[in-house]
Image (cartoon, coloured by chain):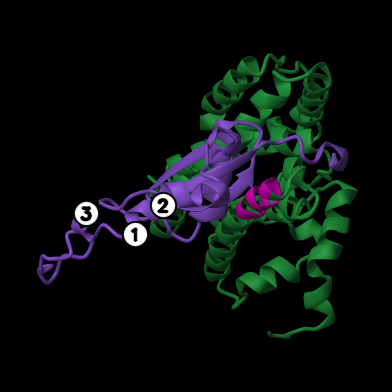
Chain colours: A purple, B green
Amino acid sequence: MAERHGDWPLWEVFVRARRGLSHVHAGSLHAPDAEMALRNARDLYTRRGEGVSLWVVKASDIEASTPDERDSFFDPAADKIYRHPTFYDVPEGVEHL
Amino acid sequence: MDTPLFDYTLGLADDALVSAQRMGWWISRAPELEEDVALANIGLDQLGQARTLLTYAGVLEGAGRTDDDLAYLRDDREFRNVKLVERSMTDFGVAMARLLVFSTYQLHLYRALAASTDETLSAIAAKAVKEVAYHVDHAAHWVVRLGDGTDESHARMQAALDAEWPYVDELFAPVDASLVGRVADPAAIRDAVLTDVRRVVAQATLAAPEVAPALGGGRVGLHTEQLGFLLAGMQHLHRSHPGATW
């Protein structure tokens, strides 16, 4: 079966650690389809109690920004401090602001 | 000693232990790394069930034998597993056909055993039900994909199912009369197991084989020669270095 290696598409895996948190990218894996990708993700990324919910997305379906676009995408945000709520005090005990 | 209960517990334990050993063969040999991990996980689940069951069998026997003693220091004639799990499993279709049958059987048996009056067996079974439900799910997905896949995968999956089917019947041998009402009786879950398996087989566009059952005898220690080779690999280290620890 080794000659078939590489036929399976790549999937990106997102794990929600617990209720109230967002899904976070955990890694990637190969699987023949979405259902099997979910099952492989369960075996590879949540077998030690890391999560309560899983998303898998075909890597080829992700549109990503490129390094060429860095200046026009991200630089203009650097000098506009009024966009950040930095003038408020964060109350104690608020963990996930 | 309650010999029938000891033999029954040993039967459940050896089914899980021998199946785990066969599953371990697939590590580094599955079609993809991801499937290596999946089959290893399933094997480890089964090994965990085997250890708790063997430990309890040792308690029932009352002769001071541990789970390691029972796993590593018995010869093939003392093993009580069904023949389904002991035969070589070097074809992926065979591995999935067997896992489908065996884990569906375990699922129904453990569910029934969870209601047993024996508190230890009941607790072991209740814990294992969730593990085994995942094994059924994994096997069923593969059987459907291969059965309802290409012409070649369909033919190979059908051949695998045909090869396993003669060994299905032995799973449902009734328990000793003294155990009726105390443990889960495999004879009582026959229809439920076969209905579940046939549903997956139909979904996979495969045909449920109509074949005569193979000769049984695993529960009384009559095995195929393949169990001897499996035990040689599994027991060699322990027997060569008795008492060795990490």
- The residue type indicated by label 3 comes to Arg
x, y percent for residue B174: 59, 36
Residue A67 seen from this side? yes
Asked if disc 1 and disc 3 are in contact, CB closer than 8 Å, the reply is no
The residue tagged 3 is A83
Real-space Cα separation, disc 1 to disc 3, in angstroms: 10 Å
Chain identity of mark 3:
A
Real-space Cα separation, disc 1 to disc 2, in angstroms: 7 Å
Which quarter of the picture shows residue A54? top left
Q: Which residues are drawn in magenta? A: B34-41
Chain identity of mark 2:
A
x, y percent for residue B30: 76, 46
The lab-note entry on whether marks 3 and 2 share a chain reads yes
Which badge, 3 or 2, comes first in the chain's sequence?
A: 2
**Mark 2 crowd level (few <14, some 14–19, many ≥20, 10 Å Cα):** few
**Which quadrant does the N terminus of chain A fall into?**
top right
The lab-note entry on whether marks 1 and 3 share a chain reads yes
- Checking the image for residue B38, the label placed there is none
Asked if disc 1 and disc 2 are in contact, CB closer than 8 Å, the reply is yes
The residue tagged 1 is A78
- The residue type indicated by label 1 comes to Ala
Residue depicted at 76% across the width and 66% down the height: B74
Determine whether B83 is above or below A76 in the image. Answer: above
Which badge, 1 or 3, comes first in the chain's sequence?
A: 1
Number of disc labels: 3
x, y percent for residue B39: 67, 49
The residue tagged 2 is A74
